[in-house]
Amino acid sequence: MDVQATVEECLELWRNPYPQLARLREEGERPVAFFCSYTPEEILHAAGLTPVRLMGAVRTITHADAHLQPYCCSLARTDLDMALAGELGFLEGEVFVQTCDTMMRLSDIWRRNAGLSFHGDLVLPIRMGEEISLPFIVEEVRRFRKQVESFIGREIWDDAIEESMHVYNRNRRLAERLYGLRRENPGILDGLSATACLVAGFWMRRDKHNELLHELVEELGKGRISQEERVPLLVSGSVCTMPDLPELLLELGADMVDDDLCCGHRYFDAFADESVSPEEALAKRMWERVNCPAKHQCIEDRAERLMRQVGDCGAKGVVFYLQSFCEPHLFDIPYLRGRLQEELGVPSLVLESELQSFSRGQLRTRLQAFIETIRGV
Amino acid sequence: MSSDGNADARAADKERRRIKSTEAMRDLMVKYYTEAKAAEGTDKHIAWITSGAPVEPLIAFDVIPVYPENHGAMCGAAHMNVELCEAAEARGFSRDLCSYARGDIGSALTKGGPIGGLPRPTFLIACNNICNTVFKWYEELSRFFGVPLFIYDTPFVRGELPAHIADYSLRQMKEYISFLEKTTNKEYDEQHFVEVAAKSLFASGLWAEVLACNQHRPAPMTCFDAFIMMAPIVTLRGTQEVVDFYQGLLAEMRERVEQGIGILPSERYRVLWDNIPVWYELRNLGRLFLELETCLVADTYTSAWTFEDVDPSDPLGSMSKIYAEVYLNINLERMADKIESLAARFDVDGMIMHSNRSCKPYSLGQYDLAKEFTRRTGKPTLVIEADHTDSRWYNRAEVETRIRDFVENLLGGGVGL
Ligand code: SF4
Ligand code: SF4
């Protein structure tokens, strides 16, 4: 495998996945959009649908303002805008998961104004990881399975879901291997390339993505690609709609050596137990996986986890990359920054992204100043 | 008649129309805050609690409930919330977070506000049936005060309440009771709980009747009055004092209805209000509506504390259902049903929606609700932009012009959108 060529393809996909999604449809696949990493993709996959993730787009809002106030995150606004503008016609449906208040309302707004043939809702508790909520999630997954079944007009067999769980578990293992390799051999693959190869999986069938990751991991295992010294940083936040942030880090002599992103490290955490019923397995996985900030912190304190990650990957600084107006993330910032600084002496920077007024220049200036301070230390 | 005589007549008329129970309410609230403040540092338990959370268990366990949201409204009305927000912002809390949360964190940090801050909690109760902001906010409080937090988790309800949500809620209600047994070192007394629950429901029934008096023309109060009068039902339902207070208020309202005493000297238009009040603007907006002879006769906010469908033989079960299905925890279609029914019951000419930058669950979806409202009722709507307690986001001139325009051109003509 030509690592460079694969990375280039994935990067192109990351910059604009939409033409590829339209192609998927032409090739006979049935793409269904999802937004949140708590989506039980395995059920969609087992139903013969292809779950694809929408992570917003850099664009001027023309339609969504009639339905959403400007004080909500640009993921919600730009995704809805694309849907209302009729640019997502290649999709067969969409799945909403209850995470934040914005998503909860967006589901209704989307269904009423831009709904496609299938509209799925998965309601989740905020108390993850506590005995009391598990039976509720199992039932909710069962209900979701029924929604999908009624859409495709037939049952989804247990063994089909088991096969899909196997595919997704393999994907998680490969992703973990990729991150492991990078940790063990710093410089073997930069954060931009690694993340590109990971997020590319949102826009193709998981089976295909497994092949890609498998070859990548094999190739990387063969030898160390030496690279110049870079300032190691960890990036924490929700999703990176565009590759600009890790790209700029490279340009400025730094690298994202690990992340706490919903399109990165948090996406592939925890496995589905292939020895119990599909509903239980899928419910249990989301229940015990690393918590998203939109969930109550009962599993583990986010600061503890972040500090451990920083220690493991040797990051010299943390960049928080958030969507403007994103309450779950914004609330945690003072606490996380405080502990990083007080206990580890690790400085951090908060950057907010608004896709409808995205400015690469501004991002660059702020990153540059931050990296220079770290270098000075 | 001399101009003095005119002034006298005006003053007499004003006095006739003034709601007399206001004093009783003020006394009740002052007593409540004084007692709560005095309890700080004693062995009495104080719990900070969100406005949508079940408070009855606290009352039954003799815990003093303290409501940061009510305090936030008070700070907002006293024009003191901005400086509290700024204190939180200086600590790194974004200006885009709910201003109740920011103000409260700021007040915890600085002891600022009209009453010198709230008494320190011994534990915290948060219920996300009003928003998901509250549990993040209370997580922060829990770290700040180093006290335990109980989360009563209410998943979003679309359509009918599904059995697995009802079941999850009931299990948590029981867990809540055990949590209280542990933290207060007292045993659960079902008999006593049923009494408290019965009082709470009785008071909420009285409150519903008070609000219903506004179905009459002229309306005996505006929802600006209701915003103030609802403080006891939010903070102290379940106690006898609250029952007494609402009995008094109801009697006064009925008398006004009988004697035809309206809150406005003249009521030309009747309007439905949506969302939390703009607390720092109550006075100015009140004046404007008076001048426009427009009465805000009902709203979606104060009616959130009117409970229905209670089975006395199953207090925990019915309570858990009620708290799962509050106005902000249901889908847009169910919300549209509610505003449609309010519009019909209160015979309104239109609706004004406060698009509240602080509160996403209340505000996102309003544009769609506005359209749906007009489609169903044929009445016009206006959406104004503001923030419930952060006046830095408020443009008075613009909002007032828009309201004036709405009343004069749309309500007058009765033209739909
Ligand atoms: S970015 Fe934040 S506000 Fe936007 S959908 Fe995600 S959690 Fe919600
Ligand atoms: S105003 Fe809205 S966001 Fe703020 S605490 Fe209340 S319900 Fe939550």
Image (cartoon, grey):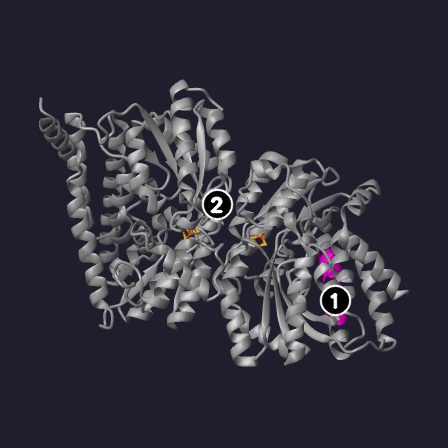
Is residue B406 among what the camera can see? yes
Magenta stretch: give its range.
Answer: A162-178
Q: Position of residue B296 (x, y in %)?
A: 32, 33
Q: Is residue A164 in the magenta section?
A: yes
How dense is the environment of label 1, judged by Cα within 10 Å: few (below 14), some, or many (20 and up)? many
Q: What residue sits 68% from the left and 59% below the top?
A: A263
Q: Residue furthest top?
A: B413
Density class for disc 2 (Cα within 10 Å; few <14, some 14-19, many ≥20) is: some
Residue A161 appears left or right of B206: right
Which quarter of the picture shows residue A275?
A: bottom right
Say which chain tag 1 marks: A
In the rendered image, residue A328 lying in the magenta stretch gets the answer no
Is the CB atom of the residue marked by disc 2 within 8 angstroms of ligand 2's nearest atom?
Answer: no
Left or right: B306, with A10 as reference point: left
Q: Which mark is residue B157?
A: 2
- Say which of A266 and B32 sits in front: B32
Is residue A297 toward the left or the right of residue A82 in the image? left
Is residue A294 shown to the viewer in this render? no
Q: Nearer the viewer, residue A281 or B342?
A: B342
- What amino acid is at disc 2? Val
Label 1 SS: helix
The CA distance from mark 2 to mark 1 is 35 Å
Asked if residue B202 lies left or right of residue A55, the reply is: left
Q: Which mark is residue A3?
A: none
The amino acid type, in three-letter code, at marker 1 is: Ala
Residue at 31% from the left image edge and 53% from the top image edge: B70
Q: Residue at coordinates 39% horizontally, 55% vertically from top-left?
A: B100
Q: Nearer the viewer, residue A98 or B10?
A: B10
Q: Same subunit under labels 2 and 1? A: no
Dot 1 corresponds to which residue?
A: A175
Relative to A191, is A109 above or below? Answer: above
